Amino acid sequence: MPSNVSRESNDGTESAPFYEALAKALKKRKAKLESICPSSDPTSKRILEEYGAIFVANKKVLPPPVCVFTNEEQVTKFQEDAGWDVEKFGFDDVELQPEAMKQLKKAREEAQKEGLDITPRDGSEAARRNYEDSVRLWNSRFEPALDYWLGQGRLTQEQVDRLRSLPLSQQVAEVLELEKSGIYFSKDLSKSILYSIAAPGASQHIAMLAFDVNQFENPRIREIMAKHGWFQTVLSDLPHFTFLGLKEKDLPKHGLRSLEINGQVFWIPNVSAVHPGLDK
Ligand SMILES: [Zn+2]
């Protein structure tokens, strides 16, 4: 069967390829894939296929107008358009798009009724981030990895200097290229940097649709989050939850497929893609 059409599985649940579901979702929002994520740009395609779940989120939230923001002004404009609510979780301010916040609060109340809790990991950085945050976090992985691979003799000083001097979009492209030969930039240097931190300007936190949860290891917490439309959608980023506002049983028809790693279920774009460092 061609991979570009929906198919129905034995149990009657419909599943759609990501690009088909995405086209539908964007059409409802009067947006076009080419202007959001030009297919001619391999970096933005890769980013879409790793973090693209937010683009099929329900209509009560606003996904970003681009796969990769390139400056702070663009991010500020988008965040103002989308709007956000602020809530105190303990001492920390959590900022999310209003519908995402509403459902997170419901999830937290449900957890608290059971004697559990849902709290932000790393304070206010757990939710909304700006462009500058995403660049700083990128560098927190990029820089140590450069030093490591230089020490290992896998990169020369010239290569390192050159990589540092590149404009960000080119830097990301070259890092992803190096990772194809096993020169990984994640925190533990064992997998793609994209499973450790988002490319600058591409974070779901910028979209204000992501929340990092301290209690991610508790299966009941994951269940409660899912019940309120929050799912793990970035492979290997365990504390990171994404607001989609959809029912879990409906995710396949919205172009997502589930992948279970060490007992945790990730909902990722239904594309045939390689996952550098994770496909063993
Ligand atoms: Zn996160």
Image (cartoon, rainbow, N blue to C red):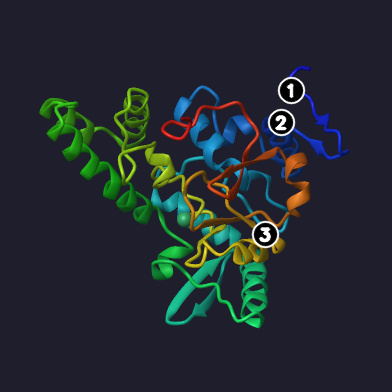
Question: Reading the chain from its start, which is encountered first: label 1 or label 2?
Answer: 1
Residue displayed at 68% across by 45% down: 56
Q: Position of residue 53 (x, y in %)?
A: 61, 44
* 5 left or right, relative to 80: right
What distance separates the C-alpha of mark 2 from that of mark 3? 22 Å
Instruction: Indicate the amino acid at tag 3.
Output: Ala
Q: Are marks 1 and 2 in contact (CB under 8 Å)?
A: yes
The numbered dot on residue 4 is 1
Q: Secondary structure at mark 1?
A: loop
The residue indicated by pointer 2 is 17
Instruction: Indicate the amino acid at tag 1.
Output: Asn
Q: Is residue 3 above or below residue 241?
A: above
Residue displayed at 49% across by 36% down: 47
Residue displayed at 70% across by 40% down: 26
What distance separates the C-alpha of mark 1 from that of mark 3? 28 Å
Question: Reading the chain from its start, which is encountered first: label 2 or label 3?
Answer: 2
The numbered dot on residue 178 is none
Tag nearer the camera, 1 or 3: 3
Q: Position of residue 256 (x, y in %)?
A: 68, 40
What distance separates the C-alpha of mark 1 from that of mark 2? 6 Å
Instruction: Indicate the amino acid at tag 2.
Output: Pro
Q: Secondary structure at mark 3?
A: helix
Q: Residues within 10 Å of mark 2 (few under 14, many from 20)?
A: many
Tag nearer the camera, 2 or 3: 3
